[in-house]
Structure formats: C-alpha cells, structure tokens
Image (spheres, rainbow, N blue to C red):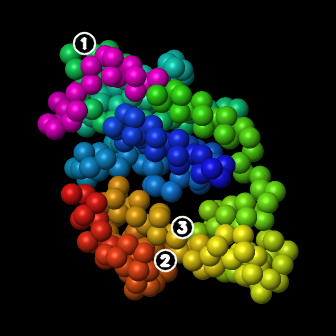
Amino acid sequence: MDRYEVPEIAVAACERVLGATITVHDASGLVARHLRVFRDAHRHPRCLAAKARDASAACVRHDQRELAPLLDRHPHGLLQRCFAGLGEAVVPLAIGGGSSGCLFAGPFTPAAGVALVRDGGRRPPAGLPEWDGEQAGAALECLRQLAARLALWAADAPAAVPATRRGRILHFVERHYCEEVSLADLAAELGLSPGRAAHVVRAECGASFVQLLADARLDHAAGLLRHSALDITAVALASGFGDVSHFHRRFRRRFAATPLAWRTAASA
C-alpha cells in the first residue's frame, strides 16, 4: 500500500463497516488532499435534499459554528439529530497536534432511548436506517478509531516530499491534479529535463504523466458524480478538466459510458 492511499482506504473501510456515509471536515486540508472521493461535505441524498430545501447556510451553522463548542465538552464524540432531522454520529478530528475538525457518520434515525446530545427538533424523513443504542455506540467507536488512524498517519509527515521518485511523482499528481499543470512543472519538481522526466514517469509508474493526471481527475470526477448533485460541467471543472468535451471523451474511454449514464447506473 502506498502511504498516500491510507486516508482514502481508512475512510472507505469505515463506510463499508458502518453501511453509512462518512463526512470529513478537516481545516488542515491534509486529509482531504488525499481522498479520492469528495467527502468534505455531506453528500448523502437525504443531506443534499435538505440543503436544497433549507439552504446550505443552515447546515454550516448547525454542523460547524454550533457544533465545535459541543465537541469541546464531548471529546469522545456525540450523537445528534441535525436541523433537517437526520441522525449523525460525530467525533472530533485532531491533525497536527490540535483540533482540526470532525468526522460524521450517518444519516440514520435514532431509535427510542438513544441519547442525543442535541436534537434539531424536526421529524426524521422516512427511509433511513434505524440505529439502536448499540449500533450508535459502535458507530462512535468506529469513528474514534478512524480519527486515531488519521492522526497517526498525519503525524508521520505525509505532507513531506517522499524519498522515492515514484512517490514524488504520485505526490505531485495528487497535489496538483485539479490545477493546470504540465510535464514541465513535474520536471522542475524532480530537477530533470521534460524529456528525461517523461521517461522516468513511465519507468516508475507504468504510464505517462498525462495518463496519471487524467486518471486522478477521472477518479475525482467519478466520486463527484456518485456523491454530489453537481451538474456535469461543474464536475468536469471541479476535477481539473478545463474542456468539457475533452472530459466527456476521457470519461467514455475510461468507463465505457457517458458521465450522465455512469451517474445514473451508479445511483441505481
């Protein structure tokens, strides 16, 4: 496993174990920079619907400004029902030796008797899984383990430039795939000529720089298509594709479907 894959693997594993959506609020930006899937905003369809109906400002107020003081008093995490009636398990996240945000798991409907630290007051929407006290407690423990895993990973200086050429190449791509970068930029980072850099990239990674960049962008785009309500043009631009037609061609070549068809199939 490449060490830069750890955050994505850890968060995705927690999602599979819980059968829930994990949201990562990390002010340091260190974790989010290494997540292939867009997870810094609540992306569950119920959450997206609530934001569209009640405006995102209410979510920001509830889950950021009002939540931070509560987490100071509940350092081991808490259970809450948000302003839209969605149950969530929340634990603080400490990156770099101090509080940098929090992790969310949900949404769910709290069963009778589940102790909530705060309750937004609205009835939960139908169709959400019901968690009893044991399930909610397990979700909190899973999030605590995830937070500890991410903190240990961050303490190992993942922001530092890797020692190997392959690591440096992948690190460069991961940091810059949403930007307008070229092989010449990578060559300057490696201290090589563009021609030599092209040879090194293929030898170390088994693909060209253009392909590595496109794959990283397409992975990001696939995550946005699956987990956000952004339209196709916005997904393309947010993933580093300046030309939407080029994005469509690349996407069809990689996934054998148009972005819209792939989103529809992924949501089925």
Label drawn at residue 113: 1
Quadrant hosting residue 152: top right
Q: CA distance from mark 1 to mark 2?
A: 49 Å
Residue at label 3? 216
Coordinates of residue 129 in the picture (x, y in percent): 22, 32
Amino acid type of disc 1?
Answer: Gly
Quadrant hosting residue 169: bottom right
Q: Which residues are magenta?
A: 121-141
Looking at the image, the residue that sits furthest to the top is 113
Label drawn at residue 40: none
Residue at label 2? 241
Residue placed at 45% from the left, 73% from the top? 237
Residue 72 relative to residue 120: left or right: right
Earlier along the polypeptide chain: callout 1 or callout 2?
1
How crowded is the residue under tag 1: few (<14 C-alpha within 10 Å), some, or many (20+)? few
Q: Describe the element under mark 2 as helix, strand or loop.
A: loop
